[in-house]
Image (cartoon, rainbow, N blue to C red):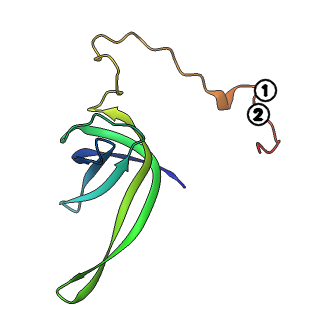
Amino acid sequence: MAITTVNGEITRTFFEGRGAEVTESWTSNGETKTKRWSAFFDTAHGLNVSDSVTVSGMHGDKVDEWDKEGEVRHSVKRTLNKSKVEKLNGAKPGAAPAAQSAPSEPVADVWNTPGSYSDETPF
């Protein structure tokens, strides 16, 4: 399965605090569009409705079939399983507010380190 990252707003919480509906919005040709994702977490996430978040997880899709006035319709239910909150309201979860945070060290680029590459199959 692919890992998918979604930026959006929490529009609903469920499953004893281990599930959340994340709604992403964008504008196309002057029209606002939305897409809803159900994110499932291993433990309670502590998110609230209207929190702006970035959530990532294992992408899953399921086609749902339903009837509306005698016409069979289809929709896609999008899920993120084993989800993790990457950012909450623009800050990393559990991080100190920006004004109090210490300067961070630059992240090492492990892919560009001489001698760290090999042609061997990793499995």
Query: How far apart in space, not on screen, are marks 2 and 1 (Cα)?
Result: 6 Å
- Provide the residue designation for mark 1: 115
Left or right, 87 with respect to 110, comes to left
**Residue 83 is drawn in which quadrant?**
top left
| Mark 1: amino acid | Gly
Q: Quadrant of residue 120?
A: top right
Q: Quadrant of the N terminus?
A: bottom right
Q: Closer to the camera, 118 or 89?
A: 89
Asked whether residue 115 is in view, the answer is yes
* Label 2 residue SS: loop
Tell me the number on the disc at residue 117: 2
Residue toward you, 83 or 25: 83
Residue 40 percent across, percent down from the top left: 38, 48
Q: Residue furthest bottom?
A: 70
Q: Residue at x 35, y 40 (%)?
A: 54
The residue positioned farthest toward the right in the image shown: 120
Residue sitting at x 30%, y 10%: 100
Question: Measured along the vertical axis of the image, is residue 64 above or below residue 80?
Answer: below
Q: Residue 97 in the image: x percent, y percent? A: 28, 17
Residue 4 appearing in the image: no
Name the side, left or right, on which 31 lies relative to 35: left
| Residue drawn at the location 24% of the way across and 58% of the way down | 34
Secondary element at image label 1: loop
- At label 2, the amino acid type is Tyr
Q: Residues within 10 Å of mark 1 (few under 14, many from 20)?
A: few
Q: Is residue 69 above or below residue 97?
A: below
Residue at far front of view? 16
Is 107 on the left-hand or right-hand side of 15? right
Q: Is the residue 5 above or below the residue 29 in the image?
A: above
Asked whether the residues under the numbered discs 2 and 1 touch, taking CB atoms below 8 Å apart as contact, a structural biologist would say yes
Residue drawn at the location 45% of the way across and 59% of the way down: 60
- Give the position of the C terminus as an image quadrant: top right
